[in-house]
Amino acid sequence: MSSPLVGPPVVKAKALYCPNCGGPVEFRGFGYAVTVVCPQCLTVLDASSPLLQIVQEAQKEQARRTPLIPLGQRGKWGGTTWEVIGFQTRGVEEDGVIYEWEEYLLFNPYKGFRYLTNYEGHWNFVVPVESLPVRRAVGSRPAVFFEGNLYRHFSGAQAITSFVLGEFPWRVKAGDEVLADDFVYPPFVLSSETTSQEVTWSRGVYTPGSDIWKAFALPGSAPRPVGVYLNQPSPFGGRVGGIWGVFALMLLALLVIAIMFGVLSSGDTVLDEHYHYSVADRGEPSFVTKEFEIEGRTSNLEVSIKTNLINNWAYFNLTLINEGTGDAFDFGREVSYYAGTDSDGAWSEGGQSSTAMVPRVPAGRYYLRVEPEMEGSETPPEKPVAGAAKPTPTPRPPLVSKRLPLPKTVYYEIVLRHDVATYGWFWVAGLLLLIPPIFLTIRAKSFETRRWSASDYPPTSGGG
């Protein structure tokens, strides 16, 4: 009878005793340990010696840190069971402030060593890199090229080890210093550590704390991350380009609809007449136009008034009357145009034409009642101030051509067009469609600004 299948042997920790305090010191990393720390007195010991010689005297008790993941805790990550065998805190100093992070050493007898790092709730699963990245430059900034991706330099500083606990496959003690450089390509970070003897590289991938708590079966919940971390993936990554693509498609659809409206609208001219009005005329200024026919579907009616006004204004009271039903549409339009020169050069304000749109005018026979009014003036005024009343004219040579009438007389043309395509709705719809992509782009930019504000290259008002 064959024996049942069994899995890999369970690694059991062996124990020796600390020469400083006599307390037991456990070994979990087989014969890989080079340095081990007594958990009782925090003395750093040489694990390569059978007598556990002291490498560093006991660390100060006030320096003690409590790991969020206890030593000896096992968890399954990427299909492999890892055990936490070492813990250290490291930090950099900037402007008198020390920024500390945690590093957890993971061990598997078949896969070797991996790391977990934690900074204010931001976690990374870190793997040593065997092949060296290729150094590049992006403008004036350093960068490295690795496995088809460009990593931009984020920061570099002298990192100091402030506390160690557990065992490590290299010599480590409190006070060790390395030159640490981070290069980012979210969600990845490439980190180099340089000493006088060597340069080592590792690559981390940003990992939610909740995934680590689940993998290592830790009680409670992971601490909430604070701020934006150097390789934290943007929640807007990939969405900005997508939403601008959707905007382009929607804008194209709007354009097609606008073209269809233009094709289907007849835009028939039903009246085109020329008139004039002078303040010197005696009698009633109002009159009615000749009758005209509006055919086809119920639609809008565009009323355009084109004048030769200059340095004056005119107001037109208008009434569109259905000859058959007596229904009337009352409205009015003002036309004003001023121009001249001053110390700043030539200026102008207003325009010589105006347009009104009468909605939903049904087919029928119509005429238009017109009542013009204006203020006479033979000389141009000073430059008007926005929002102020029309200025009092001052004598100066006229700016108008000799062929034009004096400003107290206005010559004007009234043009009526039925079923005219309007595109104001197109611009309103286009602007409304712009809101989501612009809003998302601003939020994505803000996220990146917060990320790089903690780097050696903080964004400036001119861009970063």
Image (cartoon, grey):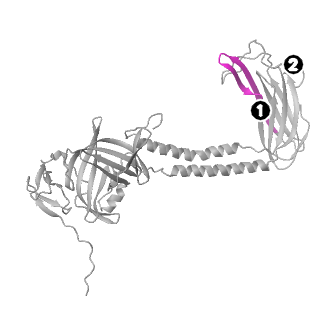
Residue 421 has which mark? Answer: none
- Using the rendered view, name the quadrant where residue 108 is placed: bottom left
Residue 68 in view of the camera: no
Residue 432 visible in the current orientation: yes
Marks 1/2: CA distance?
A: 24 Å
Please identify the quadrant where the N terminus is shown: bottom left
Dot 2 surroundings within 10 Å: few (below 14), some, or many (20 or more)?
few
Residue 257 placement, left or right of 196: right
Quarter of the image for residue 325 reads top right
Q: Which of these two is toward me, 204 or 59?
A: 204
Local SS, label 1: strand
Check disc 2 and report the residue beneath it.
280
- Residue at the extreme top of the image, as rendered: 395
Write down the quadrant of residue 18 in the picture. bottom left
Q: Which residue corresponds to the image point at 90% horizontal and 20% vertical from the top-left?
A: 282
Q: Residue furthest right?
A: 290
| Residue 343 falls inside the magenta stretch | yes
Which amino acid type is marked by label 2? Ala
Which residue is at 80% across, 35% downward?
304
Q: Which residue is mark 1?
A: 354
- The correct choice, above or below, for 17 with respect to 379 in the image is below
**Within the magenta stretch, is there residue 46?**
no
Q: Main secondary structure of the magenta part?
A: strand
Three-letter amino acid code at the position of disc 1: Ser
Q: Nearer the viewer, residue 56 or 199?
A: 199
Q: Sequence order check: which comes first, mark 1 or mark 2?
A: 2
Part of the protein shown in magenta: 329-352
Residue 157 relative to residue 257: left or right: left
